[in-house]
Image (cartoon, helix red, strand yellow):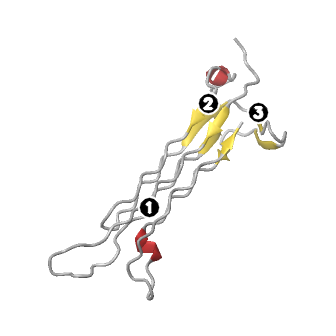
Amino acid sequence: MFIDEVNIKVIAGTGGDGCTAFRREKYVPNGGPSGGNGGRGSNIVFSVDKGLSTLLDLKYKRLIKGKNGEHGSGKNQYGRNAEDVIIKVPEGTIITDSETGNVIADLVNENDSVIVAYGGRGGRGNKAFATASNPAPDISEHGEPGEVRE
C-alpha cells in the first residue's frame, strides 16, 4: 500500500522542574541553596531515510509525543535532558503546518533533517536565584511546555 499524505500531531517534551533545596550539614549552620536546574524536553525531528518509499509507518500514528526532561534535585544536581524523537521519512517529503499552511521543510537530500517541534526549557533551581542581597532564595521555576504542531 502506498501512502503519500498523512496528518499527525507532534508534541515536544516539557522541560523538567527546578528544585528548591538547602544544604544542611552538621557544622555548616547556614549552608545556602543547593537546588539544581531541570533538564530540557525532547525535540521532534524528521529525518530522511533512503530505504523508505512511503509514509505507511506514520499512517496509524496520529500522535507523536516527546519525553519530558528530568527534574533537578538537591546537591546542585541538574536534571537529564530528554533524547530527541527522530521520525524517519522518505526523500522528497514536504512538511507543512496545518494551522498556517506554511511549509516547514522540504526534505530532498539523503542527510536532511529538521526540528519540527522544540522541547521546553528546564526550570531553574533556587541556586540560580541566589544573589548577594538574597543568599538563600526559596523559589524555583517550573519547566516550560514543548511546542505542539499538527
Residue 19 x/y as whole percent: 39, 62
- Say above or below: 147 vs 79: above
Question: Dot 1 lies on which element?
Answer: loop
Q: Is residue 36 left or right of residue 98?
A: left
N-terminal label among 3 and 2: 2
- Amino acid on which disc 1 is placed: Gly
Question: Dot 2 lies on which element?
Answer: strand
Mark 2 sits on what residue? Answer: 63
- Say above or below: 126 vs 92: below
* Foreground tag (2 vs 1): 1
Mark 3 sits on what residue? Answer: 92
Mark 1 sits on what residue? Answer: 18
Query: Furthest residue to the left?
Result: 26
**Looking at the image, do the residues carrying marks 2 and 1 touch, with CB atoms under 8 Å apart?**
no
- Amino acid on which disc 3 is placed: Gly
- Can residue 49 be seen from the camera position used here? no
